[in-house]
Image (cartoon, rainbow, N blue to C red):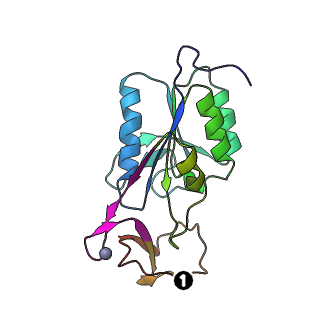
Amino acid sequence: MSYRINPKSKRGWIELITGCMFAGKTEEFIRRLQRYKYAKQDVLVFKPKIDDRYSKNDVQSHSGMSIKSIPVASSEELREYVFAQEHVDIIGVDEVQFMDTGIVDILSEIADQGIIVIANGLDKDYRNNPFRNVDKLLVQAEYVDKLTSICHSCGGNANRTQRIVDGVPAKLNEPLVVISANEKYEARCRHCYIEPS
Ligand SMILES: [Zn+2]
């Protein structure tokens, strides 16, 4: 593909917002995108179809901010949606760690076409291992903002996410991607984080 969707502009890059849970990532994601909407830029916001915790068609923060989004089942569906548009200035991708791994190359292809890509996602899973897609986007993105949270145990600076099931830290063998109501997450610092065993 050789055309540019945004021919007048030399822009087009990837911004990554990442960190643990309760760091304000979604607020920052929405804030950044909303600025472009105020300026009447063409903004498309995507999220993986897996995530319907709050609203089917909105990206919502814990604090109640929201922005309209398009749920997609695959990275290819996102790609086709973007390239079917006559004009796009900015795309946002929320919960990028829940997209399939094709998303990394596709976001790069979209940025090559002069579109600003703003991706949001967790850098580490609850086992403290790098999360898929975010691991590669940390390397590929022009701009990375890694936000921290406050440890729910001690009030220190936190960069890890502890999954709590029935009041105790989740075990190692539990599935990586689960979104349900009978579990909760806490931000933890390196000293209070308990390694799943
Ligand atoms: Zn702590």
Residue drawn at x 55%, y 28% as measured from the top left = 115
Q: Which residues are magenta?
A: 144-161
Local packing at callout 1 (Cα closer than 10 Å; few below 14, some 14-19, many 20+) is some
Q: Is residue 99 magenta?
A: no
Q: Quadrant of ligand 1?
A: bottom left
Q: Which residue is mark 1?
A: 171
Image: 172 above or below 87: below
Q: Is residue 151 magenta?
A: yes
Can you name the residue that lies furthest to the right here?
Answer: 1
Picture quarter containing residue 38? top left
Q: Position of residue 137 (x, y in %)?
A: 56, 48
Q: Is residue 8 left or right of residue 35?
A: right
| Observer-nearest of 175 and 102 | 102
Q: How many marks?
A: 1
Image: 50 above or below 86: below
Can you name the residue that lies furthest to the top here?
Answer: 8
| Observer-nearest of 73 and 163 | 163
Residue drawn at x 36%, y 31% as measured from the top left = 35
The kind of residue tagged 1 is Lys
Q: Position of residue 74 (x, y in %)?
A: 68, 47
| Observer-nearest of 72 and 134 | 134
Q: Is residue 166 visible?
A: no
Image: 40 above or below 189: above
Residue drawn at x 49%, y 25% as measured from the top left = 42
Q: Position of residue 9 (x, y in %)?
A: 52, 18
From the image, which quarter does the N terminus lie in?
top right
From the image, which quarter does the C terminus lie in?
bottom right
Q: In the image, is the residue at mark 1 within 8 Å of ligand 1 by its beta carbon?
A: no
Q: Secondary structure at mark 1?
A: loop
